[in-house]
């Protein structure tokens, strides 16, 4: 089979296993919940960190696709997990699509705030958000949030507050290292990396100039924000396929 599978790596809150997103991608698409999420919500909290998530992602990809190269699509914090995976296994990555993936601590401003919370404060925060899921999406800049009430609640139920706090602390630790940007620079020599942003949130995405210059492609989706896969899943999926196909990858239509 020549087609390259897609692997969607979710961000800090909510997985991408939901049909509202997946049905716009080919059938040969994997959207694995990371450790601490969905069926893995009960794992030891010490396993909920980005380096361990990259190992978990490798196991999921190998189980699903063997040694076939894949297109990795990492959203936000998932962009860091995808990058760490690609750094370890560059031959297994045909393309890496960073969907406003964290490059620096400036990208992780919300994670920085959550990382400093006590466990009780994190529990209270998630409880408050769950009482107004539509308000949470709207506050995150999602257009048309009122039509996504059920999806918003499912996303919020995908993980406990302890997972959000642990992931936030790991994001701060990893992206705060001076060596992290150098590792990304090296990665972009070895793997085609595409940058995908929403028009409304592009200005707040702290992408170094050298990363834009080295990117295999840079796409800004009109009138979309950080959670573009929820706002317009068909357009998001089409943009992911198009940027990879532009370099000749044998991708499904």
Image (spheres, helix red, strand yellow):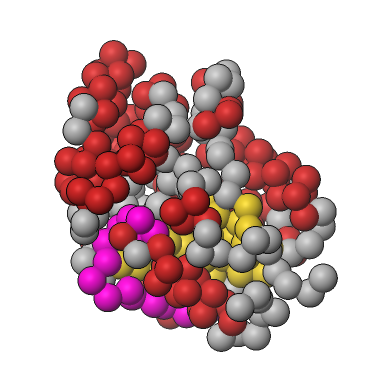
The residue nearer to you, when weighing 44 against 252, is: 252
Residue lying at 56% horizontally and 38% vertically, measured from the top left: 34
Q: Is residue 221 magenta?
A: yes
Measured as percent of width and height from the top left, residue 239 is found at 45, 74
Q: Is residue 246 visible?
A: yes
The residue nearer to you, when weighing 181 against 88, is: 88
Residue lying at 78% horizontally and 62% vertically, measured from the top left: 68
Q: Is residue 43 above or below residue 78?
A: above
Q: Quadrant of the C terminus?
A: bottom right
Q: Is residue 128 above or below residue 233?
A: above
Q: Is residue 182 visible?
A: no
Q: Specify the segment rendered in magenta.
A: 215-230
Measured as percent of width and height from the top left, residue 20 is found at 44, 54
Q: Is residue 77 magenta?
A: no
Q: How many labels were placed on the picture?
A: 0
Measured as percent of width and height from the top left, residue 131 is found at 21, 27
Q: Quadrant of the N terminus?
A: bottom right
The residue nearer to you, when weighing 34 against 54, is: 34
Q: Is residue 26 above or below residue 251?
A: above
Residue lying at 17% horizontally and 46% vertically, measured from the top left: 139
């Amino acid at each position: 089979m020549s087609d390259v599978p897609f692997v969607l790596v979710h961000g800090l809150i909510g997985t991408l296993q939901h049909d509202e997103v997946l049905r716009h991608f080919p059938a040969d698409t994997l959207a694995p919940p990371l450790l601490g999420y969905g069926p893995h919500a009960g794992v030891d909290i010490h396993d909920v960190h980005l380096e361990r998530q990259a190992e978990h992602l490798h196991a999921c990809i190998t189980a699903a696709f063997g040694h076939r190269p894949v297109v990795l699509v990492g959203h936000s914090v998932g962009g860091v997990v995808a990058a760490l995976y690609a750094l370890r296994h560059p031959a297994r990555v045909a393309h890496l699509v960073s969907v406003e993936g964290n490059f620096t601590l400036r990208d992780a401003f919300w994670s920085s705030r959550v990382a400093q919370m006590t466990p009780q404060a994190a529990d209270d925060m998630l409880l408050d958000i769950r009482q107004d899921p539509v308000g949470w999406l709207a506050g995150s800049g999602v257009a048309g949030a009122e039509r996504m009430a059920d999806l918003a609640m499912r996303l919020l139920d995908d993980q406990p507050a302890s997972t959000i706090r642990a992931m936030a602390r790991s994001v701060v630790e990893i992206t705060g290292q001076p060596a992290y940007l150098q590792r990304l620079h090296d990665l972009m020599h070895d793997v085609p990396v595409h940058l995908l942003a929403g028009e409304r949130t592009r200005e707040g995405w702290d992408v170094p100039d050298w990363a834009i210059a080295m990117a295999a492609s840079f796409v800004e989706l009109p009138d979309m924000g950080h959670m573009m896969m929820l706002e317009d899943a068909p357009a998001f999926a089409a943009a992911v396929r198009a940027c990879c196909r532009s370099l000749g990858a044998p991708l499904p239509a």
